[in-house]
Image: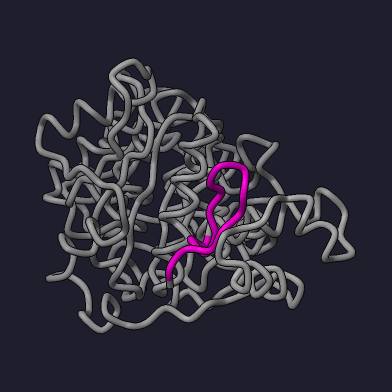
Amino acid sequence: MEKEKIFYNALNLITEANFPLLNNLYQKYHSFSLIYQNLEKENLPPKITERYQAIQPEKEYQKLKEKQIYLILIEEENYPQILKETNSPPLGLYLKTSLPIEKIFKEKLALAIVGTRKATKIGQEIAKKFAYEISSLGGTVVSGLAFGIDKSAHLGALEGKGLTLAVLANGLDFVYPQANYSLAEKIIQKGALISEYPLNSPSLPFRFLERNRIISGLSKGVLVVEAPSRSGALNTANYALEENREIFAIPGSIFSKNSAGCNFLIQKGAKLTTKLEDILEELKEQIDLEIINQKKEIEFNSSIEKNVFEFLKENEKGLEFDEILKKFNLSFQELLNILSSLEIKNLVKKVGGRWKIFDL
C-alpha cells in the first residue's frame, strides 16, 4: 500500500490536485502506480508532462514523513466509511494528528458546525455552545478552521472530551489563516487537520468550495450558525442536502444580514435549531441512544473554576461580577475567562447584570 501512496502523492502534485482527471484515470487503471507508469500515454497538457518528468515520487513522499503527515487512500480500512459513501469522495486524505489514525473517524456522532467568517459575538457564543455540548457527549465537531464561526466551533469542541476535525483548503505544510496557527496546534493534539491537497498547495478560492464537500461528508449533519445569503456555509449545506445529511440552522432576526442564509435554509426545510436536543432528535436513529440519554458529568478546567461555580450555586439570586471578584484572588481577565468557560458549558448565564447558574 505504501507504493500506491507514493504514486498517489506524486500524481496529486503532477496534476496540481486535478481531481476530475485523477478520478477518470483511477477508473481506467484502478492503481496509482499504473497511472504513473502510463501517464505519458494519456496525451495530457504539456505542463503535466513537465511536472511528471521533474517530480521524484519517493523524495516527495519522504517530505510527508518528515512533516509527520499521514496519507490515507480510499481503499484503506482507516478511510472514513461515511465519506466513502458520498458522491465524490477524495481518493486520498492527508492528516496531521498526534492521535492514532484509527481513532480519528470512529465516532458515530459527528456534526459539522459552519458559518460566516464575520460572525457576531452572539454567533460565536452559539457555535461554541453547540460544539462544546456535542464534544461533551464524546462526539466529533467538524469545521474549516476559518475565522468566525469555524474558529468558535473548534474552540468549543476543545473544551469537551470529543474530537474536532479541521478540513483545510490547502496543503498541510502551512496553516491558513496564519492567525489560527496556535489553534491548529491544539486541534492536532485533540483531533486532526485534514486536506485532500498535497504539500505546497495554496488556498485558492475554488478550493474552499471543494473542501466543503468533505466537511459535510465527514458529518451526520450540518449546523449553520450564521450565514449571509451568499456564503460558503450554504455551499456546505447544499452538499449535505445532496448526501442526505440532516441540515440544522439557527434562526435570526429578519434585519440581520448574518441570519439571511439561516432563515432561508429554514424556509427550505432545514430544522430550526435552538438547543442540542433539536439535533439529537434528528440523529437518534444514526447514533447510540446511550449517547443521547447519558447524564453529562460536569468537567471543570481547574479547581478555581469549580469553586466559582459552587459559589454561584450557593447564591441562587445571582451575583454581580465585582461580588465574585472580591471572593477570589483573581484578576479581572482571569475571572472573565472562567465565567466565559462556564457559560460555554451551559452552566452559568448572565441575567440583568448578574451571573446565575442554569438549573441542572
Q: Magenta stretch containing residue 186, yes or no?
A: no
The residue at the point 19 percent across, 26 percent down is 264
Examine the rendered structure and indicate whether residue 51 appears above or below residue 213: above
Q: How is the image coloured?
A: one colour
- Position of the C terminus, as image quadrant, is bottom left
Vertical side of 72 occupied by 323: above or below? above
Which residue shows up at 24% across the image and 53% down it?
221
Residue 62 drawn at (x, y percent)? 63, 60
**Which residue occupies the extreme front position in the image?**
317
> Where residue 259 appears, x then y in whole percent?
33, 26
- 27 versus 186 height, above or below: above
Front in this rendered view, residue 297 or 247: 297
- Check the picture and name the quadrant holding the N terminus: bottom left
Residue 186, image x and y in percent?
A: 65, 60
Q: Is residue 52 visible?
A: no
Give the quadrant of residue 5.
bottom left
Residue 263 at least partly seen: yes
Which residues are drawn in magenta? Answer: 345-359
Left-right relation of 197 to 213: right
Query: Residue 295 versus residue 238: which sits nearer the camera?
Result: 295
